Amino acid sequence: MFALIETDCLHAMGKRNSRLAWWASKEVLYHYKRITRHRTIVMGYNTYVHFPMNRFDPTQTYLIVTIRPESRRTVHNNVRFVSRFDLEEMNTNDFMLVGGYTMFCLLHDKIHCLYKIHMNHTFHECDMKDPCVVENIETIYLKNKLI
């Protein structure tokens, strides 16, 4: 499994059960699209809820990991809700994990390549720190204005 994480200069990545810490600048979107192209996107339910709806690519498949997949509904044809146990049964070699914190902690042993987008500013009110320690890391440093 591949993983993509975006952190600020203090290695913060978000706020528990709140909106995402990142905002989609053109530079971030370029790297996001380049890294996730042709891969199945995996994210937790909280990340899905706060994910900008206009950012869902109709050509990609999204797997949303949730405790109760049978009770979840979506307007997107390419979004499926799965349990953690369903995900463990799948071949995740070409999957891209994009969040959130709990998902990184649960699936860290399956991650073989981590892409880290490191912003040069501080996300305000973040309480989640980068949970991943992976040997094969490609860090993309972006110089963004303070948000």
Image: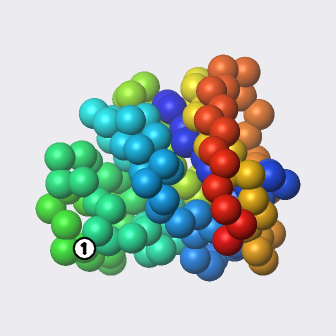
Which residue does the image show at 58% across and 76% down from the upper left? 19
Q: In the visual, does 30 lie left or right of 107?
A: left
Q: Where is 139 relative to 143, above or below?
A: above
Q: Residues within 10 Å of mark 1 (few under 14, many from 20)?
A: few
In front here: 117 or 78? 117
Q: Quadrant of residue 140?
A: top right
Which residue does the image show at 72% across and 21% down from the upper left? 135
Secondary structure, mark 1, is loop
Q: Where is 67 relative to 10, above or below?
A: below
Q: Report the residue marked by disc 1.
A: 74
Residue 95 visible at all: no
In front here: 120 or 12? 120
Q: Quadrant of residue 75?
A: bottom left
Which residue does the image show at 66% across and 39% down from the upper left? 141
Residue 145 visible at all: yes
In front here: 145 or 39? 145
Q: Which quarter of the rendering shows the C terminus?
A: bottom right
Q: In the visual, does 111 lie left or right of 31?
A: right
Dot 1 amino acid type: Thr
Which residue does the image show at 75% across and 59% down from the upper left? 121
Residue 49: x, y in percent?
44, 75
Most extreme residue toward the top is 136
Residue 5: x, y in percent?
61, 46
